Image: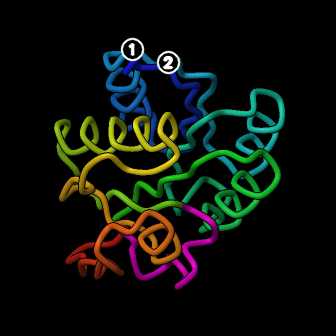
Amino acid sequence: MTVSRMRVLIVEDEVLVAAELAWLVEELGHEVVGQAISSDEALELAQKHKPDLALVDIHLTDGPTGVEVARRVSQDCGSMVLFMTANQKRVPDDFAGAAGLIAKPYSENGVREAVTFVQHCLEAGCPQRRPPLSLTVAPSYAERWGVGGVVKRQESPTSH
């Protein structure tokens, strides 16, 4: 199977975290099409670039607006969205259209595995293996992909 190059939007208000994510994404051979720190900037970049994947933090410079960003980017742009957050309690039950979440603090390896899993899902239309432990799959995607039912969200001891 040929591994395609994904176009990835990073929505994160912490500059160092965004830079680390960009580095990881590029190390995997994908293209970072933009980095946003606010919801307006994220939506503008998503409309302009139509990314394959958006990595979205919940709390941005303009408040806890990442949920709305996820909903709009997945609906309006058809992009796959993963939340990158320590604030898992703010993720609505429907995951706002996102495919899942990677809990902070995350490991580089965990992000790599989750992004690679999503890439293979986009290529094949469904998973070819079980999701990595670093990725909590949204209930609607777990059902659609048949990945063993709904994955319980982990409780985070800290919030961002």
Of residues 24 and 3, the one drawn nearer to the viewer in this rendering: 3
Assign a secondary structure to mark 2.
loop
Assign a secondary structure to mark 1.
loop
Image location (x, y in percent) of residue 69: 69, 57
Q: Which residue is mark 1?
A: 29
Image location (x, y in percent) of residue 119: 43, 35
Of residues 73 and 99, the one drawn nearer to the viewer in this rendering: 99
Q: Is residue 150 above or below residue 62?
A: below
Indicate yes or no whether the magenta region holds residue 97: yes
Q: What residue appears at the point 52 percent right and 85 percent down from the top-left corner?
A: 93
**Are the residues flagged by discs 2 and 1 in contact, CB closer than 8 Å?**
yes
Quadrant of the rendered image containing residue 158: bottom left
Of residues 4 and 47, the one drawn nearer to the viewer in this rendering: 4
Q: What residue appears at the point 63 percent right and 71 percent down from the top-left corner?
A: 96
Q: Amino acid at mark 1?
A: Gly
Q: Which residue is mark 2?
A: 5
Indicate the colouring scheme: rainbow
Indicate yes or no whether the magenta region holds residue 135: no
Image location (x, y in percent) of residue 110: 20, 45
